[in-house]
Image (cartoon, helix red, strand yellow):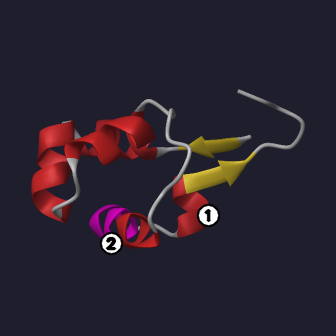
Amino acid sequence: MIKCHLSTYMGQAKMKVADVASETELNRSTITSLYKETATRVDLKAVEKLCELFNCGVGDLFEYIEGEEK
């Protein structure tokens, strides 16, 4: 399973979905699906913009958890 830590980063920065959408120019539905961990596909440009916003790496934003399935 791939775990997305976007909700953690947003919480630490006290940001809402609308704030992230405004800062990154990403679609709100993209951010929401990552936040709720319901996304099945992610555009690399979206990952890049989120990493830039939160000053983190891809490995910080996403985590592979072996043996778990959602």
Name the spot of residue 10 as percent of width and height, x first.
31, 42
Name the spot of residue 28 as percent of width and height, x first.
21, 43
Judging by the rendered image, the residue that carries numbered circle 2 is 52
Mark 2 and mark 1 lie on one chain; the one further toward the N terminus is 2
Q: Amino acid at mark 2?
A: Glu
Side of 27 relative to 36 (left or right): left
Q: Quadrant of the N terminus?
A: top right
Mark 1, Cα crowd under 10 Å, few <14 / some 14-19 / many 20+, is few
Give SS at disc 1. Answer: helix
Q: Quadrant of the C terminus?
A: top right
Q: Is residue 2 magenta?
A: no
Name the spot of residue 7 as percent of width and height, x first.
40, 37
Side of 6 relative to 20 (left or right): right
Q: Residue furthest right?
A: 67
Name the spot of residue 18 as percent of width and height, x first.
13, 41
Q: Is residue 15 visible?
A: no
- Name the residue located 28 percent from the left edge and 40 percent from the top edge: 29
- Name the residue located 50 percent from the left edge and 33 percent from the top edge: 38
Region rendered in magenta: 49-55
Secondary structure character of the magenta stretch overall: helix
State the mark number for residue 59: 1
Q: Quadrant of residue 31?
A: top left
Q: Quadrant of residue 43?
A: bottom left
